[in-house]
């Protein structure tokens, strides 16, 4: 069964300036056991919540299987890490995730392309290695809660 492995709701941008300068320190509490999602707005408490420019890409998802050992959401700056679900193949689909509180539908809009910061935060060569495998950017269609643990998945194309 697919599962939600990690969740991130970060109130601040950590990748400011040049990658060679290194990221800003992680704010306390950005890795959480549950996130609240609002339709059309994103992840409550996240840096992109309610930002007009990010409305169709306010929730990001990445597959654990495509990351090197030890890399997590703090390094790749996505909101949801899943296992057992090939998210990079879902552009254009509506993905429903239900971790026990009812389904949260997300319209998968486009790929979440990795950036040069990945070579600093994940490891040398990660930027190129994650091209086409950096996850997806989604528009939330429902209000709801997602939690770490098993998740029921429905994909509507």
Image (cartoon, rainbow, N blue to C red):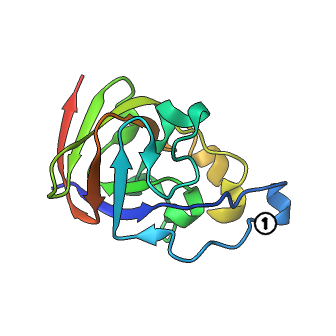
Which residue is at the front of the view, 74 or 132? 74
Q: Position of residue 138 (x, y in %)?
A: 42, 36
| Residue at mark 1 | 22
Work out whether 59 lies above or below 16.
Answer: above
Residue 60 visible here: no
Describe the element under mark 1 as helix, strand or loop. loop
Work out whether 27 lies above or below 17.
Answer: below
- In the image, taking residue 52 as reference, residue 150 lies left or right, namely left
Q: Quadrant of residue 14?
A: bottom right
Which residue is at the front of the view, 85 or 104? 104
Estimate how packed mark 1 is, as few (under 14), some (14 to 19) or many (20 or more) residues with alpha carbons within 10 Å. some
Q: Position of residue 4 (x, y in %)?
A: 29, 59
Work out whether 68 lies above or below 109.
Answer: below
Locate the C terminus and report the quarter of the image it occupies. Answer: top left
Q: Residue at x 23, y 46 (%)?
A: 97
Which residue is at the front of the view, 79 or 36? 36
Residue positioned most to the bottom: 28
Residue 38 visible here: yes
Q: Quadrant of residue 125?
A: bottom right
Q: Position of residue 59 (x, y in %)?
A: 44, 44
Locate the N terminus and report the quarter of the image it occupies. Answer: bottom left
Q: Residue at x 63, y 72 (%)?
A: 26
């Amino acid at each position: 069964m697919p599962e939600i492995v990690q969740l991130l709701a970060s109130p601040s941008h950590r990748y400011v300036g040049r990658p060679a300068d290194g990221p800003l320190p992680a704010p306390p509490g950005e890795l959480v056991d549950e996130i609240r999602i609002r339709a059309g707005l994103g992840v409550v408490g996240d840096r992109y919540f309610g930002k007009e420019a990010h409305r169709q890409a306010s929730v990001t998802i990445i597959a654990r299987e495509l990351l090197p050992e030890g890399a997590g959401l703090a390094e790749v700056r996505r909101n949801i890490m899943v296992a057992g679900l090939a998210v990079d193949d879902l552009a254009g689909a509506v993905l429903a995730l239900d971790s026990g509180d009812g389904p949260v539908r997300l319209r998968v809009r486009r790929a979440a392309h990795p950036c040069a910061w990945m070579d600093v935060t994940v490891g040398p060569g990660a930027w190129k290695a994650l091209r086409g495998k950096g996850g997806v950017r989604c528009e939330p269609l429902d209000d709801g809660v997602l939690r770490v643990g098993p998740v029921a998945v429905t994909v509507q194309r």
